[in-house]
Image (cartoon, grey):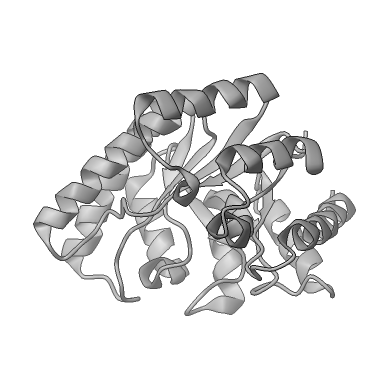
Amino acid sequence: MTAFSIGSWSFHGLFKSGKMNLFGYLESIKYRYRLSHADIWNGMLVSTEDNYIQSIKTTLDEEGLTVACLSVDGADVWHNDPAIRDQKYQKALLYLDIARRWGVQTLRIDMGVGSVEMSEEQFEYCIKRYREYAQFAYDHGFRVGPQTHQPASQAPQNLKRIYNEISAPGFGILLNVSRWLVDKEIGDEMVAPFTMHAQFDRAFVDFSGTDLLHKVQLLHQGGYQGCWSLEFRGGENEYLEAEHDLLTLKRAVCLVR
């Protein structure tokens, strides 16, 4: 069954103004948009304490919702300062366990490399950590990897090299479709075979023409089996704009399939 979702960051304007919290987002996904999959940004969490995390799990179960993706800020694999690197590692371990508890399908933990070029030290450290994370993810039924929104992960050759080196079924990438710093013409096609979760954003993909249909077709041909998600970055009229983009994305996916 084809699954769709709306990234919770799409409602960051409502969230920042105090008009939406994570539970309101889940309610909107279920009852406003009539979807069965959530796409959660951890910036909406008010705590990582056990009772709060369990209350979210209870809500997910009660509403019959699946977390297609949990996107985590602040747990990046690499940092130039080893002490901060270890702090981020501890946060990553925390969210790997939260992902396990929630039964997520995918978990985003970024590389944290702030340049397109990666040093061998950075590359080897990312391999080490992602291999560890991917084994845990595989053991608990989900996948983990970076998102294409930081410099090193906006170079598809870097991602392909990491994927080939790790060679583990628990590893994948969260693809912001068409969001590349280099090799934009071939990036989506190159990473489609190991894309675990795909987000479409009109800031990078033209929703009004054939571009959207082409990108959906490209992912489909690459064997993509994940949730078709969208992200709206406008910050205004978020309920309406998200609904518009959701219907447009649904149409494109239905035309291709």
Q: Is residue 124 left or right of residue 22?
A: left
Q: Position of residue 156 (x, y in %)?
A: 47, 68
Q: Residue at x 66, y 63 (%)?
A: 232
Q: Is residue 236 left or right of residue 103?
A: right
156 or 77, nearer to the observer: 77
Q: Position of residue 221 (x, y in %)?
A: 71, 54
3 or 56, nearer to the observer: 56
Q: How many marks?
A: 0
Q: Is residue 34 visible?
A: no
Q: Residue at x 54, y 35 (%)?
A: 105
Q: Residue at x 83, y 52 (%)?
A: 250
Q: Quadrant of residue 53?
A: top left
Q: Is residue 142 left or right of residue 37?
A: left
83 or 167, nearer to the observer: 83
Q: Is residue 25 above or below residue 243?
A: above
Q: Quadrant of residue 76?
A: bottom left
250 or 46, nearer to the observer: 46
**Quadrant of the rendering where the N terminus is positioned:** top right
Q: Position of residue 117 (x, y in %)?
A: 30, 76
Q: Is residue 178 above or below residue 132?
A: below
Q: Position of residue 80 (x, y in %)?
A: 16, 66
Q: Is residue 27 left or right of residue 172?
A: right
Q: Is residue 98 visible?
A: yes
